[in-house]
Image (cartoon, coloured by chain):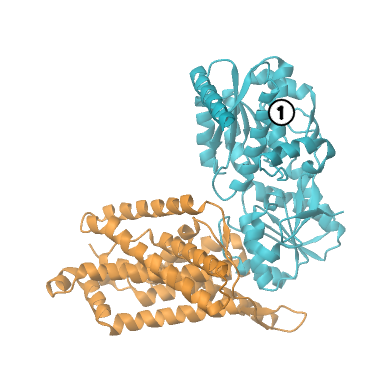
Chain colours: A orange, B cyan
Amino acid sequence: MQDLLYFSQQLINGLTIGSTYALIAIGYTMVYGIIGMINFAHGEIYMIGAYTALIAITGLTALGLAWLPLILIVALLCAMIVSSSMGWAVERVAYRPVRGRHRLIPLISAIGMSIFLQNYVHLAQGSRNIGFPALIDGGFNFGSGDGFQMSLSYMQITIFITTLICMTALSLFISRSRTGRACRAVSQDLGMANLLGIDTNRIISATFVIGAALAAVAGLLLGMYYGSVDPLFGFIAGLKAFTAAVLGGIGSIPGAMLGGLILGVAESMTSGYLSGEYKDVISFSLLILILLFKPTGLLGKPEVEKI
Amino acid sequence: MRTSVKKLVTAVSTSVALMGAGHAAAEIQIGIAGPMTGPVAQYGDMQFSGARMAIEQINANGGVMGEELVAVEYDDVCDPKQAVTVANSLVNDGVRFVIGHLCSSSTQPASDIYEDEGILMVTPASTSPEITERGYELVFRTIGLDSMQGPVAANYIASQNPERVAIVHDKQQYGEGIATAVRDTLKDAGVEIAMFEGITAGDKDFSSLVTKLKQADVDYVYYGGYHPELGLILRQADSAGLDARFMGPEGVGNKDINTIAGEAAEGLLVTLPPAFDQKAENQALVEAFEEKGEDPSGPFVLTSYTAVQLVAEGIEAAGSTDPFDVAAALREGTFQTPIGTVEYDKSGDMKSFEFVVYEWHSDGSKTPVN
């Protein structure tokens, strides 16, 4: 019983972090699916989302607003708006001018953008860790009085529910809406979609905006869950999310979700049963193994490979 | 108004004169190397504020051998790679005395360069024993060693008769070194160590670690590392309902841990150098800091002040600005400083330095525990 509770607790920890990896991974995978490039600045967009949410929360609290759901919704909207505009601007400034050139050029441009955004936040917000207020406290406890108690916090529940809503909304958007259909068309054949009258530039911008908005959601959730933000916060998370996207099959949206969850659970099980020191070793070995035996990732299709 | 214009004119003309003087005689350059930016910049602030104050006061009292001290500041971001770059530019700039670096992992590679190039280094903060173990002639410190700090922490924990203790560290030179010292002392005292585990510095998610600590049912957790990670561990442990007392080295003892951990920082135990700013003989100095709007209570402010003072007194005693002569004078002499009487052994460590256990509070204040 004790062992089962311990296992479930590590599973919950892993799924929580995994679902936020999935939210960030969507941004990598959608951009790759459509224009075949890796947007390395995506982790920074996520970090900016977290900072914006923090600024909004601080501002609203200073204004004397006390009703929690309103604070969270306003902060979320602010973060999504700022991150989305940032995602859109990054595409316009750094990627569109070099689109269609040799594949290394947009890649270098993306890395440059990532360094620029990181240092911009360094200058604007300082390099120190800034504490995030714990807005959602408490949770449920399972297990007997003196033994190991499993806890499921309201924050973790919030993360699951929000992720679920975002993923469902995204799936519906991609499969049902007009723009979603256009997205799928562009990802299958950009040139042909253009000939058929789809405004591909607009669709590509939309992809960046959607990815950035989801990253902002993850930024707010993780900022609150962990409790602090710093300008390098996006780099590591971005790396993990990128790994998740590749694991699940880059270019595939269900793949990004699956990859994120697998990576999160693998990390928490490693720290839980082996040692925290091996966390990254195991998750990256997993990535290498999957790429060796299934180079397109778990749910990737071979025809996604482009250029 | 008139006086401020006058001051401005004097300041401008002095700096013009200094610029004209360049690296020629009539001034002694003191390099200050530490993190001005980066995750542990608050410790750098302490270092720079202490060293600047010492330089100001020494100059106001007529300088060293009639020459003025000039501060040259360098930012190493507490990054070993950056520290090497900083050390090289110090060599280029012709600086022969360095106050720094702060993080042990930066001090170690930088000190190789200083020793080769004949530059005297006094670190006000690096506590890793390895720094002075290599038989270098020009390396000194104004702080104790992990091998002194670890046992103080471990003896305190052992005196509380805990059933099980967990030790966590950040796998860096400072954190792992001190965690190892704590583990060894606890083992000798017969305390059961339930866990000895590393985390990755810069990580944010410690939920698995906290779950593991809960499962291991420990009374005390010792963390070797810096405050950004411990702050998050404290906070995540608090929300997961982990009932254990945390303890850390002086690398976690600053007010930023409160902004990260909030209420969860209450009751944290920290080993720190004694509060030098509370000593009666330092009150004039404390007032000087307060007049400038600076806080002298940080653990590295007065150690940095002392480092500058020792370099100045060493130069006076040697009657020369040759770093080797100054090093010899420092090893021979006995110096009265704000951190007490300083005498050096052959390796460049102080013959005695004590650490004290403090209890940290959620408002950023601390009280000694005895």
- The residue depicted at 71 percent of the width and 59 percent of the height is B363
Chain on which label 1 sits: B
Percent x, y for residue A211? 36, 69
Where's the N terminus of chain B, which quadrant? top right
Circle 1 residues within 10 Å: few <14, some 14–19, many ≥20: many
Q: Is residue A141 above or below residue B71?
A: below
Asked whether the viewer can see residue B164, the reply is yes
Q: Secondary structure at mark 1?
A: helix
Mark 1 lies on residue = B309
Q: Is residue A194 left or right of residue A293?
A: left
Asked whether the viewer can see residue B141, the reply is no
- The residue depicted at 68 percent of the width and 69 percent of the height is B238
Q: Is residue B176 above or below residue B85?
A: below
- The residue depicted at 48 percent of the width and 65 percent of the height is A50
- The residue depicted at 50 percent of the width and 54 percent of the height is A125
Percent x, y for residue A302? 28, 71
Percent x, y for residue B118? 60, 23
Q: As shown in the figure, which amino acid type bears the numbered disc 1?
A: Gln
Q: Is residue B145 above or below residue B116?
A: below
